[in-house]
């Protein structure tokens, strides 16, 4: 989080027109969010990425019964950051955000596939939990 690969800057990068990925955005930040429940202490942690008007939940750590609290915290941060798009890849969060019925969001299912290397193939499919920020890790 201390060394982001994207820089928030007002000027455009002329070289970025030649590449799919750009290293400059109007707004970019990582945000770590601790989620607390009354009388239960910390129930989860989120790592959010905000790039221009899009927020992505890169990593989410919580027990499935706490998903509604985590989803409410995520939704609250997305509204506070005034983003137009919120991307979630955890099935528990997706279901919980959908149940919030926030008028700002319309939902659209998008499938995102991962290719796992042979070194990770020994992990049973039911025990794999890939996050939105795990793209590079899947090739470990």
Image (cartoon, rainbow, N blue to C red):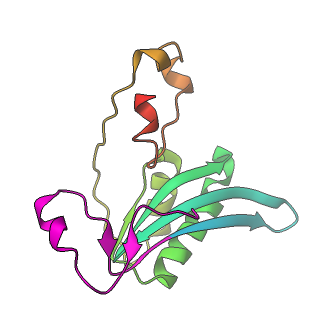
The residue under the point 77% across, 65% down is 37
Q: Which image quarter: residue 76?
A: bottom right
Is residue 70 found left or right of 119 in the rendered image? Answer: right
Vertically, is 105 above or below 96?
Answer: below
The residue under the point 48% across, 58% down is 57
Query: Who is closer to the viewer here, 85 or 17?
Result: 17
Query: Who is closer to the viewer here, 50 or 82?
Result: 50
- The image shows residue 135 at horizontal and vertical percentages of 39, 41
Is residue 94 found left or right of 22 in the rendered image? Answer: right
Is residue 90 found left or right of 2 in the rendered image? Answer: left
> In the image, which residues are magenta?
1-29
Q: Which image quarter: residue 101?
A: bottom left
Residue placed furthest toward the bottom = 10
Residue placed furthest toward the front = 15
* Residue 21 on the magenta segment: yes
The residue under the point 70% across, 65% down is 34
Q: Quadrant of the N terminus?
A: bottom right
- The image shows residue 115 at horizontal and vertical percentages of 33, 28
- The image shows residue 36 at horizontal and vertical percentages of 76, 66
Vertically, is 57 above or below 129?
Answer: below
- Looking at the magenta stretch, what is its main secondary structure? loop
């Amino acid at each position: 989080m201390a060394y982001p690969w994207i820089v928030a800057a007002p000027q455009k990068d002329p070289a970025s027109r030649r590449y799919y990925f750009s290293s400059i955005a109007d707004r970019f930040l990582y945000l770590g969010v601790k989620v607390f429940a009354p009388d239960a202490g910390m129930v989860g942690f989120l790592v959010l990425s905000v790039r221009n008007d899009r927020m992505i939940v890169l990593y989410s750590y919580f027990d499935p019964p706490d998903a509604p609290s985590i989803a409410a915290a995520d939704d609250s941060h997305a509204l506070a950051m005034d983003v137009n798009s919120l991307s979630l890849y955890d099935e528990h969060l997706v279901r919980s955000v959908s149940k919030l019925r926030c008028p700002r969001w319309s939902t659209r299912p998008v499938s995102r596939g991962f290719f796992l290397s042979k070194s990770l193939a020994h992990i049973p499919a039911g025990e794999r939990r890939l996050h939105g920020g795990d793209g590079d890790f899947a090739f470990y």
